[in-house]
Image (tube, rainbow, N blue to C red):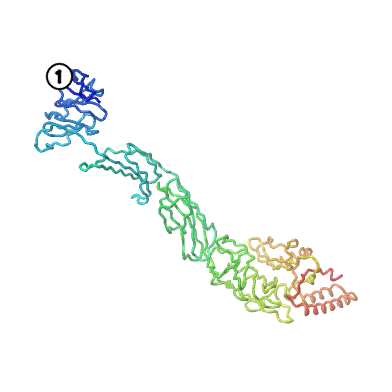
Amino acid sequence: MALISTQGMQSDVWRSVDSGSIWSLVKDDYNGGDGNGATFMAVDSSNNLYIIFNQDVWQSIDSGTSWTKVNDDYNGGEGQNALVADFDGSNFILIEGDEDIWSSADSGTTWTKINGSDFNGGNGDPFGIATTTVTTDLTFSARSCSASDCSDASFSGALTNPVSGALSVTNNRYFQYRALFTSDSAVASPELYNFSIDYNSYTDADVPVAKSISPENGRGNNDGNITLNYNVTDASSISNCSLMLNGQLNQTEASVTRNITKSFSLTGLGLGAYTWNVSCTDSYNNAGSTETWRFYISNMNSFSGITTNLSQVNVSNIENFILDEPSAGRINFSAAVDLSGGADIDSYANISSNRVEINSASLPELNKSAFVHLLGLSYTNPRPLRNGETCPSSICTEVSYSGGEFIFSVTSFSTYSSEETPTGDSGSSGSTGGSNNRESEDVLVPEEQQACVESWRCNAWGECESGKQTRNCWDFNQCGTRAKAPPVSRECEIGEKGNAPQQEASAEESEQGQREITGRGIGGITAFITLTLGKYGGTTAFLVLVLIVVAIYVAYRYKRNHPRGKFSGRYVEIPRSRIEK
């Protein structure tokens, strides 16, 4: 430990390193003949020495060996001399003869009067000054925020008693920090000053990337209640995301979490088409939007089973559209259906016991060809009805009847049901109808042992639309193969009808054994007799006629003993050429 002392007007500086027992001279006349004595000496926290005499301030930075005058009139000519001085840690404090107090924050170079009103109220001159040490704590923390009042974030990263410290906070629009300075002194109030903070400014110029997730573009909805899902990614926090429905602001969500699936829910939407997109804004006011997608609302809650799920299909072009009521029946549309305008199917379509109905005037988009399935029937030989009357073969074509399920195709929609075919009535619809206005070149006969032979049936060609005609075809024997399947579409010119093209295609289809068989029973054989007698004459015609009569009798007996639905074999086509031989 070193003790430094001055010797009055002699201006000498002495030092002791043993607590004052032995002294040695370190500087003779510290002020170099300037005539200054020494009123008092002080030392700062860096062990620099200071001597004040009258208004002069001297400094030594080498333990008293050399000295420099840093101020030769600290109070600016007020005439008062300093009486006592000391350092309070960072400031140089002195009290002069009139009890005014001065302070220097730059090691005595400049001075400021901090109390000029006789601090002790005339109670005499001071003879000493000393500083005391108290314990203090400084705690520093910060937060970054999207909201201007930072209500969306909490302070974090507290640093205690830092000389300096670094805090890592996320990039955001707003930044706040706080410092808490405390002391254990009962008489001193802590004061925080000369506080500084350095930060690196970050500017995000990239727009948020927002993407729509579901429902996919062009999908449908059954009830008007729909959830729209999206997500958004960005380097900065997301301030808000807004749903735009049909180009108008619908709803907004604030403080959206990035990189997860978010959603907007809508309820009670009316029938029709809707557009939607989501626009998101980040904390730097950059905005990005999803693509604009469409969805379509229909009313279709009354059906179940394998009914088409509109949310899984392109509503403007639904292939194999199905309405199902598992306990009663099903409608399977063979033509593509467009529900992009929205459809109130629950109000205008119905499937019940032995009955399917579609109001085509209210649902023109469903007035298309389809397969009708009627379930739970107990008939022996059913036939289709349209609006309560026998359905003509130009509209209805029977496909199959098995296990109480009656399947027939229709070309358009109204109300369809079925009834038992009256005894002796060969019927007038589809493949079970009579020979009126029908072509018949093949005869169906039972064959139990032969391999399955495809027997295809086709509706008439539809109207020419957009240069294309279509029709429905099915294998009567249900072989499960398509080796002889006829074409179901072809090119056409606007104005062509369905019947003429059917005749044009008949020659080629006949060669493949694929002609439509439109007659059966007595009607079919009668047509065959007419053709046979027209082709042969004389004895040959007579023999053929006898054979035909025998065939009629055999067929009659067979039909009595084998009513429809009891035959366990398959029907195959026997070309006319084989019968004639």
Front residue of this view, candidates 163 and 57: 163
Quarter of the N terminus within the rendering:
top left
Q: Please say if 222 is above or below 94.
A: below
| 533 vs 111, nearest the viewer | 111
- Where in the figure is residue 350, as x and y percent of width and height? 58, 73
Q: Residue furthest right?
A: 539
Mark 1 = which residue?
Answer: 10
Q: Where is residue 428 in the image (x, y as percent from the top left)?
A: 71, 76
* Residue depicted at x 85% and y 78%: 550
SS category of the residue bearing label 1:
helix
* Residue 422 against residue 475 in the figure, above or below: below
Using the image, determine if residue 133 lies above or below residue 579. Answer: above
- Give coordinates of residue 84: x percent, y percent: 15, 30
Q: Is residue 522 visible?
A: no
Which amino acid does the dot numbered 1 rest on?
Gln
The image shows residue 317 at horizontal and vertical percentages of 59, 61
The quarter of the rendered structure image containing the C terminus is bottom right
